[in-house]
Image (cartoon, helix red, strand yellow):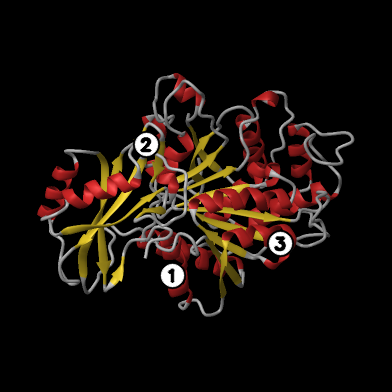
Amino acid sequence: MPSSAIKLTVLPGDGIGPEVVSSALKIISAAGVTLDADVQVAGAEAFKRGVESGVPSDTIQSIERTRLVLKGPLETPIGFGNKSANVTLRKLFETFANVRPVRELPGVKTPYAGRHIDIVVVRENVEDLYAGIEHMETPAVAQCLKLITRPGCEKITRFAFEYAMAEGRHKIHCATKSNIMKLTEGLVQHTFEDISKEYSSIEARHILVDNCAHQLAMHPEQFDIILTTNMNGDILSDLTSGLTGGLGFAPSANIGSDVAMFEAVHGSAPDIAGKNLANPTALILSALMLLRHVGQGKIASAIENAVLVTLESGVRTGDMEGARAPSSTSEFTDAIISNLGKTSKLAKPREFKRINVPQSSKEVGHVDVASRQVVGVDVFVESLEHPVQIGDTLTRLAEGTGLALKVISNRGTAVWPDTGHGTSLVDAYQCRFIASGPVEAEVEDSQIFDLLQRASSTYRWVHIEKLQRFNGKDGFSKAQGES
């Protein structure tokens, strides 16, 4: 194997995965790129072997060696394991940036054809609700913790701006729901606004994510790069792929400081697996992102031109609109190879430089503050009692602790003191206690322990949250209707 060969781990995947991965590798080889591919297993086969995560140790060791992955779609079969192999890989190798470009492709008919859509969704890939931290508070109430960190926001924001610089893009929209989730989604917005000042050549705008979805349906051509959180990005990136032909044309990358993984967005399509019917375009375009990532931009552009020429010439797989005499996967692949060296008349690849990927710090991420103060505690309790009865009981139990009951809320709405407005109740109540002494008084752990011991004599408490102020600002939200 030549010393210049690109070392990578190949995960053929499940369903149509081996077919589309084989197509991409065949085209790359025909374009003159030498690969040193280590083929490994992940997904359904691993689950059936009893690997709970879906990712065997041999696969992990291979990725640790190569730091580069081309991956087919992976299944998480029902009844095998309890984790997603895809999520395992992203978390294990801290691929914090998910990149999903979409663009109008020649000859691919969509309602938006002719509007020159060319958008990249940059999605934070390891935090948010996808941290997967869930609990049953009561048999009737489930919760999921939405975790957003300042270091995580900084990394994904810098990545988005560096990606814009690499592709010569000029505008980034940061899409959040900060009007409702002021602390979590608000942290994303504020971090974006802070870091954008370092990239004065790029226009930076904040947009509410619901308006972003609306605008994507109405005027998608206004967007260049959309930076957003994990859950928002999962939804918006599927929306954007629908604008330009669907998941069969949607490539993606999962990029971290040390490891980068490239895969199609679509699933394993088991109904057509092994029938030579799959559309390999998304995986081919993902492989081109891999080539650009390792500095093979010229060859990537040559292959992309061949893909564009093939599409504009009318060659289609069966899933593409207008496929009167659909080509098989292998025929579509051979058509692209035959078009290597040709240039599209209707579209052209975007010039691309290698991305300056932000590096992960080995230190524990934190934010320095000048002052911090514990001003109270939220105690979450399970009860079938009415809020008035709970309020009277907890007020009495808290006497002498230095803490006073301020408000009780149910599903985020204040229900005690009585607001005069009825709301449907569930058996999980958030009971907020604040220091009953001077405003500047610091609530001690001993007071909280005392309160919990007293409350547990009557109620089953589920969990607690300290109420903290940082630099004089409340680090907690208020319930709807709380004064």
Dot 3 amino acid type: Pro
Where residue 324 sits: x, y (%)? 89, 36
Residue under pointer 2: 61
Rendered residue at 39%/36% (across/down): 60
Where residue 455 sits: x, y (%)? 19, 44
Say which quarter of the image contains residue 27. top right
Q: Secondary structure at mark 3?
A: helix
Residue under pointer 3: 220
Q: Nearer the viewer, mark 2 or mark 1?
A: 1
In the rendered structure, which disc, 1 or 3, sits on the residue that comes first in sequence? 1
Say which quarter of the image contains residue 373. bottom left
Find the distance from the CA under tag 2 to the CA under tag 3: 42 Å
Residue under pointer 1: 190
Locate residue 410 relative to residue 23 in the image: left or right: left
In the rendered structure, which disc, 2 or 3, sits on the residue that comes first in sequence? 2
Find the distance from the CA under tag 2 to the CA under tag 1: 38 Å
Locate residue 437 relative to residue 378 in the image: left or right: left
Marks 2 and 1: CB-CB under 8 Å?
no
Q: Nearer the viewer, mark 2 or mark 3?
A: 3
Q: 327 and 202: which one is in front?
A: 202
Decide: few, some or many residues near mark 2? Use Cα within 10 Å; few <14, some 14-19, many ≥20: few
Q: Secondary structure at mark 2?
A: helix
